[in-house]
Amino acid sequence: MIAMRFRESDYAAIKRKAEKANMNFTEFVTAAAMNKPVTVINGLENVLKEQKAIGRNINQLTTLCNMGKIVCPDLRELKEQYTEVLTTLNEIVGRCG
């Protein structure tokens, strides 16, 4: 462990940047010091929430199928939602590239 000193204003600014990058203070300072790129992707959080929701739906359908409660569910709506998520992710990646 190594201790470092920062002016309060510098510490606060670095901490804000780390939070914006979804990193803790140490990860952010280390990445910056090692000249590693720190990329912030706006809008990704909402897309990931939607992707997790779709995953939960798939898990629920799988459980119901395995229990024999449903047979061959209609996945069109789920496929449309997934396509929208992929489209949004592609747009975000396009803005970052």
Image (cartoon, helix red, strand yellow):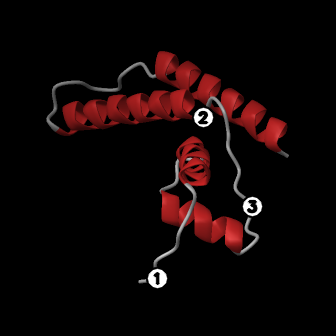
Of pointers 1 and 2, the one earlier in the residue sequence: 1
Q: Which numbered disc flags the more N-terminal residue, 3 or 2? A: 3
Q: Residue at x 83, y 38 (%)?
A: 94
Residue 40: x and y, percent? 67, 44
Q: Name the residue at 71% across, 50% down.
A: 39
Q: Which mark identifies residue 44?
A: 2
Q: Nearer the viewer, residue 59 or 12?
A: 12
Which element is circle 3 on? loop
- Disc 2 marks a residue whose amino acid type is Leu
- Element class at badge 2: helix
Q: Which of the two labelled residues, at mark 3 and mark 1, occupies the earlier sequence position?
A: 1
Foreground mark, 3 or 1, reads: 1
In the rendered structure, the answer to whether residue 72 lies left or right of residue 87 reads left
Which quadrant of the structure image shows residue 42?
A: top right
Distance (Cα) linking label 1 and label 2: 33 Å
Give the numbered dot on residue 2. Answer: 1
Question: In this figure, which residue is indicated by the disc labeled 3?
Answer: 37
- Foreground pick, 59 / 51: 51
